[in-house]
Structures are given as C-alpha cells and as structure tokens.
Image: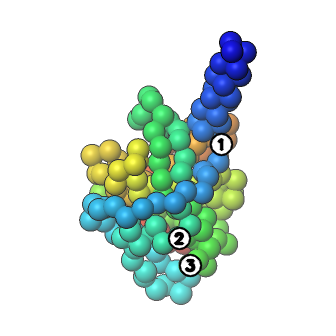
C-alpha cells in the first residue's frame, strides 16, 4: 500500500514539473466573455485584419503553465501561437515584426527569435478571460525556462495589451 502511494506521488510530481516547463500544449477552450480588445495584423500586402480575443481563439488553441517576470507563482495561460498567426498572414518570413500595444509601447522581434522560441498569444489566464489589470487582454507569453535559457529573449517580448503586428525591416 505504501509503495503504491509513493509511486502515485512520484508520478504527480513528474506531471507537475512537466506542466511548468517547456512548450505550449494543445487545449480546447470553451466559450467565454472576453474583455473588448482588438489585435490588428498588417499582412505583407498592407491589408489590416482585426481579431477580437474570441476570433483569435478560432486558430488552434494551446495552454502553457509558467511564471513571468511579474508573477511569482505559475499561472495557466491559454491562447494561440504567434507563429501560426504570422504564417496565416504571410509574416512568417519577415525579417522581423513590430508589435505595438494599446498604450503605444512597441518592440521589434527578429526572425531568429520567432523561429527559436514559442510565443503564446494569451487570451486567458487561469481559466478566465485575460484582463488589462492582469496584463491582458492579449499578452505575449514565453515559458520561463525557455526565456532564461535563450540569449535572444528579453522582457520586451512579454507584450501586454498587444494591439498591432506588422512586418519590420
């Protein structure tokens, strides 16, 4: 009986450690009321396509449990992969992208970064719609261990209130 308990405890420990590290995993997301927000994608031809958080969730959805520089405890972030959004709009081969937030903060992300690091465009956190108060409603998330191990990442990659993505040379 005791050995069964220890085996179960060890399995749970391994699962919890796996959930805290690594890549986003596919997730099914049910309907939810999101904060009003828009992410505008400017494709290679200059066309602007707007997405609400609910419309973003029509892409394949993923879950990632991780810490961020502003969260001491891990949180479960859910959303879509930035790489899939970029590919859908022909921006996956751009030399770099410019990401602008609602407050006019902007950052440039190189093709090298985009190809080497999984970036989740989070629309939910801990099962709830992401809010501006919690650095949402559309936030870029990178796994904490990946972030720490990469020489290409910086805190500027954790864009919150993301509002616009376009190619940048």
Q: Position of residue 1 (x, y in %)?
A: 69, 15
Among numbered discs 2 and 3, the one appearing first in the sequence = 2
Tag 2 secondary structure: loop
The image quarter in which residue 103 lies = bottom left
Task: Please give the label number shown on residue 59.
Answer: 2
**CA gap, disc 2 to disc 3?**
12 Å
The C terminus sits in image quarter: bottom right
Q: Earlier in the sequence, mark 2 or mark 1?
A: 1
Is residue 35 something that shows in the picture?
yes
Pick the residue in front: 101 or 22.
22
Residue at position x 65%, y 42% from top?
22
Of the image marks 3 and 1, the number of the one nearer the N terminus: 1
Question: Pointers 2 and 3 in contact (CB under 8 A)?
Answer: no
Residue assigned mark 1: 22
Q: Toward the viewer: 39 or 76?
A: 76
Which mark is nearer the camera, 2 or 3? 2
- Please give the label number shown on residue 89: 3
């Amino acid at each position: 009986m005791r050995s069964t308990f220890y085996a179960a405890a060890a399995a749970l420990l391994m699962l919890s450690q796996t959930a805290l590290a690594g890549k986003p995993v596919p997730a099914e997301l049910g309907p939810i009321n999101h904060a009003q927000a828009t992410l505008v994608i400017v494709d290679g031809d200059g066309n602007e396509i707007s997405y609400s958080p609910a419309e973003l969730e029509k892409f394949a959805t993923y879950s990632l449990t991780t810490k961020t520089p502003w969260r001491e405890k891990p949180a479960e972030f859910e959303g879509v992969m930035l790489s899939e959004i970029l590919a859908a709009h022909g921006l996956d081969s751009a030399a770099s992208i410019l990401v602008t937030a609602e407050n006019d903060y902007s950052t440039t992300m190189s093709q090298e970064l985009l190809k080497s690091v999984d970036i989740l465009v989070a629309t939910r956190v801990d099962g709830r719609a992401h809010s501006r108060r919690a650095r949402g409603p559309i936030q870029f998330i990178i796994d904490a261990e990946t972030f720490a191990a990469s020489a290409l990442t910086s805190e500027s990659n954790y864009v919150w209130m993301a509002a616009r993505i376009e190619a940048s040379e």
